[in-house]
Image (cartoon, helix red, strand yellow):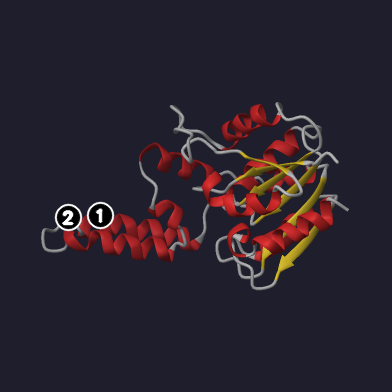
Amino acid sequence: MIKPNLIIIPGWGGNFQTWSDFITLAERYFEVMCIELPCFGNEPCPDMIWGVDEYANFAIEKIKKIKGKKILLGHSFGGQIATYIVAKNPKLIDKLVLSGAAIFRPKKSLKRTIFYVLAKIGKLIFRLPILNRLEIVMKKILYRFAKSPDYTHTSGRKKEIFQKIIRQDLGYLLPNVKVKTFVVWGEDDSYVPVIQGKRIAKLIPDSSLEIIKGGRHGLHIHNKKYLLNILKKTILT
């Protein structure tokens, strides 16, 4: 029996290593490929400041080389890329799976506004010799407030890319996703709330939603067997 291809696009900071345990389980049922994105894993950062479209084009070139049935699994930022790919290239993929997908990127929120105001004030305050030792500690507190650990561990060109992609809202593309789509979400996802998963499932014409009770953002880490069982049930049957 020929196994279908399961193509994984990890979230921000993810790579083959962070998905390795899930991949080991999934290889019994799928031919698994994990696309490592530029800036992560073994892929160097690009020379330019990439957005979702450039990342999508990078992934498309790899997907085109794969023969047979193709299921695309996008997690978090990877779900943002996967949505762009499928909406723009409806014949490239047979089925789509979105897990904790960061599709909706509000241009401005109250929390983000407060965060940037505090950050600007902090830069001025912590220039004082007595207080500059507290700068690192206060930055961690601010980023925790903003629920953005990805930003905390990002610097240089990667930080500029991150600032670009979090402003690219792809909600408008969801009605253009024409392939069968499975939306899988952790009930307790604190990065991308489950309400966003429900919105995604409503806006994609041929989609279904499964919420994992007690699940968090990294289902492939904390709920890997459950996630695999959902894939087997929805895709292999």
Query: Measuring 55% from the left and 61% from the top, which residue is drawn there?
Result: 191
SS at circle 2? loop
Identify the image quadrant of residue 194. bottom right
Instruction: Determine which of the numbered discs, if any, sits on residue 127 in the image.
Output: 2
Q: Is mark 1 in CB contact (under 8 Å) with mark 2? A: yes
The percent coordinates of residue 46 (x first, y second) are: 46, 30
User: Disc 1 versus disc 2: distance between alpha carbons?
Assistant: 7 Å
SS at circle 1? helix
In the picture of the structure, the residue carrying the numbered disc 1 is 123
Viewer-proximal residue among 24 and 237: 24
Viewer-proximal residue among 82 and 204: 82
Q: From the viewer's perspective, tell me whether residue 149 is left or right of residue 210.
A: left
The percent coordinates of residue 210 (x first, y second) are: 76, 63
Residue 103 seen? no
Q: From the viewer's perspective, tell me whether residue 185 is left or right of residue 127.
A: right
Residue 161 seen? yes
The percent coordinates of residue 74 (x first, y second) are: 66, 47
Instruction: Determine which of the numbered discs, if any, sits on residue 192 in the image.
Output: none
Kind of residue indicated by mark 2? Arg
Q: Quadrant of the N terminus?
A: top right
Query: Measuring 64% from the left and 73% from the top, which residue is drawn there?
Result: 214
**Which residue is situated farthest in the left direction here?**
129
